[in-house]
Amino acid sequence: MAILPVITAPDPRLKVKSKPVERADDEIRRLMDDMLETMYEAPGIGLSAVQVGVHKRVIVIDLAKEGEEPQPLKLANPEILWLSGETVTFEEGCLSVPGFYAEVTRPAGIRIRYLDPENEARELAADGLLATVIHHEMDHLDGILFIDHLTALRRNIILRKLAKARRAKPPARVAAPGA
Ligand code: NI
């Protein structure tokens, strides 16, 4: 496994829409494992392939807390089957938006279908934080960042600060979990 460099906003590669994978094969399994290792090292709770510069519809998530057994989720080609009409608000961060956090309102429940690492079609229903993280990561696959859910004013302030920080020095590591 390998730790991959994480792209940060306003890098235009984050705005590119990712393509479905043909099948979950060895290459995709290796990508998923590298993404998980990268996410654990950051640390983060979710990561999309686009964040490591790979425009494939692949996501990894692990909500296990420190000291708990890892619960890695590896998803290829996730598709939304159902979104609840109720909403929930969490403070979100993102490994591609280091150092910034904001409340985002998303559907409280989600049901998706996806390919697992063995190329089996599966379904998953989630609520709470997991629903939010899945939605956040699926947004990445369509070139959407959590800051795109904020007002343009707030988003532009964050993007300006990120661009300035990037010119000054490489992005600092974030202490709190991002996604
Ligand atoms: Ni993110």
Image (cartoon, helix red, strand yellow):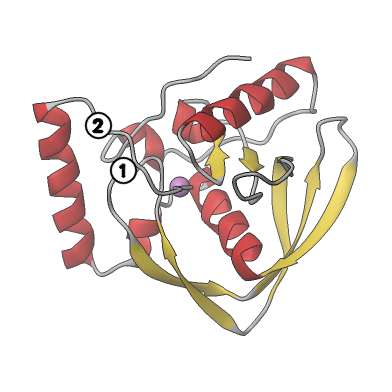
The reply to whether dot 2 and dot 1 touch (C-beta < 8 Å) is yes
Of 128 and 26, nearer the camera is 128
Task: Determine whether 60 is above or below 103 in the image.
Answer: above
Task: Tell me which residue sits at (71%, 53%) in the image.
Answer: 79
Mark 2 residue element? loop
Of 153 and 177, nearer the camera is 177
Q: Position of residue 122 (x, y in %)?
A: 87, 49
Task: Tell me which residue sits at (53%, 27%) in the image.
Answer: 38
Beta carbon at label 2 within 8 Å of ligand 1:
no
Q: CA distance from mark 2 to mark 1?
A: 7 Å
Q: Position of residue 139 (x, y in %)?
A: 51, 53
For residue 159, side relative to residue 54 (left or right): left
Q: Amino acid at mark 1?
A: Pro
User: Mark 2 or mark 1: which comes first in sequence?
Assistant: 1
Mark 1 residue element? loop
* Residue that badge 1 annotates: 98
Residue 59 falls in which quadrant of the image?
top right
Q: Amino acid at mark 2?
A: Pro
Task: Determine whether 100 is above or below 27 in the image.
Answer: below
Residue 12 falls in which quadrant of the image?
top left
Task: Tell me which residue sits at (33%, 64%) in the image.
Answer: 102
Of 31 and 102, nearer the camera is 102
Would you call the spot at circle 2 few (<14 residues within 10 Å), some (14-19), or many (20 or more)?
Answer: some
* Residue that badge 2 annotates: 171
Beta carbon at label 1 within 8 Å of ligand 1:
no
Which quadrant of the figure contains the N terminus? top right
Q: Position of residue 121 (x, y in %)?
A: 88, 44
Task: Determine whether 48 is above or below 158 in the image.
Answer: above
Residue 129 falls in which quadrant of the image?
bottom right
Residue 146: which disc?
A: none
For residue 162, side relative to residue 117 (left or right): left
